[in-house]
Image (tube, grey):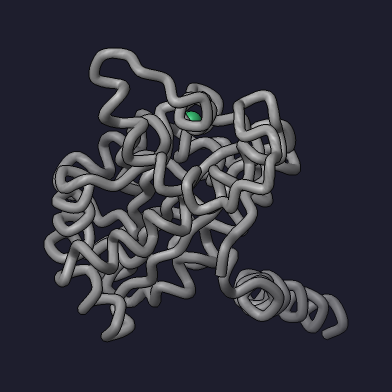
């Protein structure tokens, strides 16, 4: 009888162990499990903008601490072949040190990414964001600047060169927003450059609201969130303007 009781106890323990482990994980870190394994239409539809923001915050923390997720890209290609349900859209710079998927520890099919020098917003970017949120269901828009941005430095130095002149002109309002107190306003002034970069992000967040009634309405309804952030190319960390 004792042996039988022991076997029954073992069987019960084995049967209940997965549930116990699952419950424990969900209790301690519910947002960490949110849509983490594979995105789906249901997952995207159920997600709130705040949940998506938490997912991206946690993804950057994993990346910056050297604990990024190992991904099977071949498997992700197969899983996303018939459709995409990205949770967020990111406007970021072309800078080679700021690849959005990597620094947020995301995979294929997880985010829309519009990259342009100086992470500025124009009508083409707005059109892309409107598609991403209104048509494709993305819940979060991140305007992501970064430290030591060459485009921001170019705007500070009033660089004139080909088509770059027109692009840098879109960063100039951020330069002009800083009162002239006789400080060095060139790219040699590191603090000035980083302040311009921050203002540029915040101004472009506002531009999205002002120039896209579609996105403004989605945000007002709480269906999406628009937020600015800054990536530090020296630490790998993202700081958020919210
Ligand atoms: Zn840049």
Can you name the residue that lies furthest to the top here? Answer: 162
Residue 49: % across, % down: 40, 73
Residue 76: % across, % down: 35, 38
- Indicate left or right for 59 with 39 as reference: right
Residue 148: % across, % down: 61, 30
Q: 35 above or below 150?
A: below
Q: Quadrant of residue 187?
A: top right
Residue at 65% x, 40% y: name it: 192
In the picture, the quarter occupied by the C terminus is bottom right
In this view, the residue in front, 69 or 187, is 187
In the picture, the quarter occupied by the N terminus is bottom right
Residue 232 appears in the figure:
yes
- Indicate left or right for 95 with 40 as reference: right
In this view, the residue in front, 80 or 52, is 52
Residue 11 appears in the figure:
no
Q: Quadrant of residue 197?
A: top right
Q: 179 above or below 55?
A: above
In this view, the residue in front, 134 or 30, is 134
Residue at 33% x, 77% y: name it: 46
Count up the numbered dots.
0
Residue at 22% x, 54% y: name it: 129
Q: Quadrant of residue 27?
A: bottom right
Can you name the residue that lies furthest to the front here? Answer: 182
Q: 185 above or below 120?
A: above
Residue at 38% x, 71% y: name it: 225
């Amino acid at each position: 009888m004792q042996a039988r009781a022991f076997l029954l106890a073992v069987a019960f323990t084995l049967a209940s162990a997965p549930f116990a482990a699952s419950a424990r994980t969900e209790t301690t870190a519910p947002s960490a499990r949110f849509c983490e394994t594979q995105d789906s239409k249901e997952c995207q539809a159920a997600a709130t903008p705040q949940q998506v923001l938490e997912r991206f915050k946690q993804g950057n923390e994993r990346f910056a601490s050297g604990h990024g997720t190992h991904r099977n890209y071949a498997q992700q290609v197969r899983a996303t072949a018939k459709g995409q349900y990205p949770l967020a859209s990111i406007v970021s710079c072309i800078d080679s040190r700021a690849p959005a998927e990597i620094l947020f520890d995301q995979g294929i099919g997880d985010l829309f990414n519009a990259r342009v020098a100086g992470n500025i917003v124009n009508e083409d970017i707005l059109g892309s964001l409107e598609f991403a949120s209104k048509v494709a269901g993305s819940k979060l828009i991140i305007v992501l600047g970064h430290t030591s941005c060459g485009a921001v430095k170019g705007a500070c130095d009033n660089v004139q060169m080909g088509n770059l002149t027109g692009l840098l002109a879109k960063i100039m309002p951020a330069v002009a927003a800083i009162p002239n107190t006789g400080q060095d306003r060139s790219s040699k002034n590191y603090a000035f450059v980083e302040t311009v970069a921050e203002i540029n992000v915040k101004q472009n967040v506002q531009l999205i609201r002002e120039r896209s009634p579609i996105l403004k309405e989605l945000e007002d309804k709480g269906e999406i969130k628009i937020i600015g952030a800054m990536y530090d190319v020296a630490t790998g960390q993202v700081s958020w303007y919210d």
